[in-house]
Every structure is written in structure tokens, then in C-alpha cells.
Amino acid sequence: MIRIALQTSYRRKLRRLAPIDPAGGRRDGPTVVVAPHPDDETLGCGGTILRKRGAGCAVTVVFITDGRSSHAHLMPPDRLAEIRKAEALAACRALRVPDRAVHFLGYPDGRLSDHQDEAAADLLDLFRTVRPAEVFYPHRLDPPADHRAANHIVRRAMAEWGGRADAFEYPVWAWHHWPFVRLAPTSGGGARAVVRNTIGTLSGVRLLRALNVAVDVRSVLDGKRAALAEHRSQMERQGADPDWPTLRDVAGGDLLACLLQPVEVFLWTPGRVLAEAPRLAAAAP
């Protein structure tokens, strides 16, 4: 009963986030979506991508790691990396992003923190070329190490670039806490991880405070589901292997339900605020 009451209260707060048109005003400019792993682009902002592409906006998707470690105990990592690259291209096509606008940096999955300098330099080159009006990347509260590293890498590259792109941080695994997911230990989402994340987010309070805008994706939700289905290694058991974990298994499906809501939510930081931050920091006594 407590979990249901809290979920109801939290979802009411999410519905009150400021709605934004992802293709309105200056938001119709070039957009860069940064994903630490193949599937994060769809999970975190697939609906927003579809709405932007439907309005004719240019979207570039960047995958920082190769995803080789998601099921490395069940498949040779090199083979898994090849599969996930092909899946990522298929998912981006489903999101109406052309192959020429998809980039793979190829850093090793699970070890991104060891390659922050190189990855930031790669993104800096891309930002200078694309000159985005908006950049989407993982939320700072996302618990996986690669997601936290990706957040730092993007913010560093944006600061070095100096452009006035608006920043949108999208949660993926930040939803993996009670009351949004159950505590029951299920495949891919054990109770210990949920408890750890629940403590880290103060039962979701920190996450709700770190979200300020929402995009209505009801009209494209089927398209988002179709794009996610292209990540077959993450959504389907390979060869009917009962030990092959999928996103549907995580917390009994609760995590996926959070990521397939009728709205996508973000922490939005206007570009002018980002641009002024280094100057204000330098002027501080």
C-alpha cells in the first residue's frame, strides 16, 4: 500500500513538470544524443528523437562504448560488440536517424572511466562539427559507472567547446529504486541493487528534485517500442537460453515500465547557464 501511494504521488509530480515542445522555437536546431551503451538512446529519449525527426530536425546519435560486457559470460565479447552495433543502427533507423548521423566511439563497455580524456576529445570534435543547439546525455544520478562517466565526459566536452547548447539529462537506471521498482530479487534487478539505489536517491526524492521538464511522447510511443525491439540482445533471450537476462526481467519489468511512460523527463540546463558557469567560477573569491 505504501509503495502504491508513493508511486501515485510521484507520478502526479512528474505530470506537473513543465511541458516542452521538442521541436519548437530554437529546439528545431541540430541535436546530439549521447548514449553510453546501445539502447540508452531509445530508453532515455527515443520518443523525443522521434518527435524531433518527425518535425524535420537533424539528430546525431553517439554511442560511447561498444556494449560488449552486457552478456559477456554467455557470448564472446567481440561477437556481442558486433551484434550490438548492428542493433544500434537498426534502432536508430527505427527512430528515423540515418546511418550517416550515427557515430560509434568504440570505448570498452564497463571501463569508460579509464578513457574519459579520449572520449571527451572525440565529443569535442563532434560538437565543433555539428554545433548542436541541444545535447541529450545520461542523468547525473544514473548509478552505472559508465553512465556517470558519460555524464562527466559530455559536460567536460561542452565546457571546452563553449557553445550555448541546452543540456538535457535523461534518467535510465536512475529509476531502479523503490518505490518505482519492487524490492523482490529478480533476474537482472536484485534486491541489493534496489536497496542501494533507494538509499542513494532517498527513495526517489533526489531524482524528482533533479527533473524539471517533460516531453509528451504518447503519439510516438509505439515507434519507441519498435526501436527498442531492435536491441534484440537486450530484449529477447538469445537461442531461447533461459539464463540470458533481458530488460524485461529487471525488477520484474518495473524498470521498463518506467522507461515506457507516456512522457520522457529530463533535467534541463539552458545553454546560457552552462556558458556562464566557467566565468562565474573563475570570478568567485
Image (spheres, helix red, strand yellow):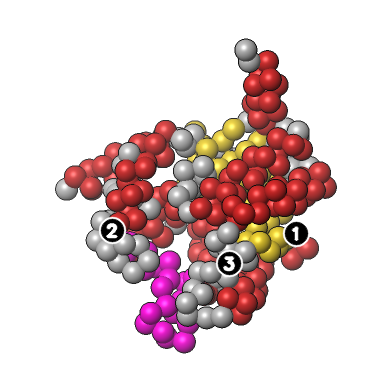
Report if the CB atoms under discs 1 and 2 are less than 8 Å apart.
Answer: no
Specify which label sits upstream in the sequence, 1 or 3. Answer: 3
- Magenta region: which residues? 234-252
Residue sitting at 38 percent across and 57 percent down?
A: 255
Pointer 2 residue = 191
Q: Nearer the viewer, mark 1 or mark 2?
A: 2
| Residue under the image location 51 percent in, 57 percent down | 43
Q: CA distance from mark 1 to mark 2?
A: 39 Å
Residue lying at 62% horizontally and 77% vertically, measured from the top left: 78
Q: Position of residue 9 (x, y in %)?
A: 29, 39
- Residue topped by disc 3: 67
Residue 258 seen in this snapshot: yes
34 left or right of 249 in image: right
- Give the residue at the far right of this rendering: 129
Whether residue 53 is visible: no
Q: Could you tell me the amino acid type at mark 2? A: Ala
Residue 242 lies within the magenta run: yes
Q: Badge 2, how many Cα within 10 Å: few under 14, some, many 20+?
A: some
Q: Nearer the viewer, residue 158 or 40?
A: 158
Q: Residue furthest left?
A: 1
Mark 1, Cα crowd under 10 Å, few <14 / some 14-19 / many 20+, is some
The residue to which callout 1 is attached is 101
Secondary structure of residue under mark 1: helix
C-alpha distance separating marks 2 and 3: 24 Å
* Sequence-first tag of 2 and 3: 3
What amino acid is labelled 3 in the image? Gly
Q: How many marks?
A: 3
**Secondary structure category for the residue under label 2:** helix
Residue 90 rendering spot, x and y as whole percentages: 64, 71
Report the front residue among 219 and 27. 27
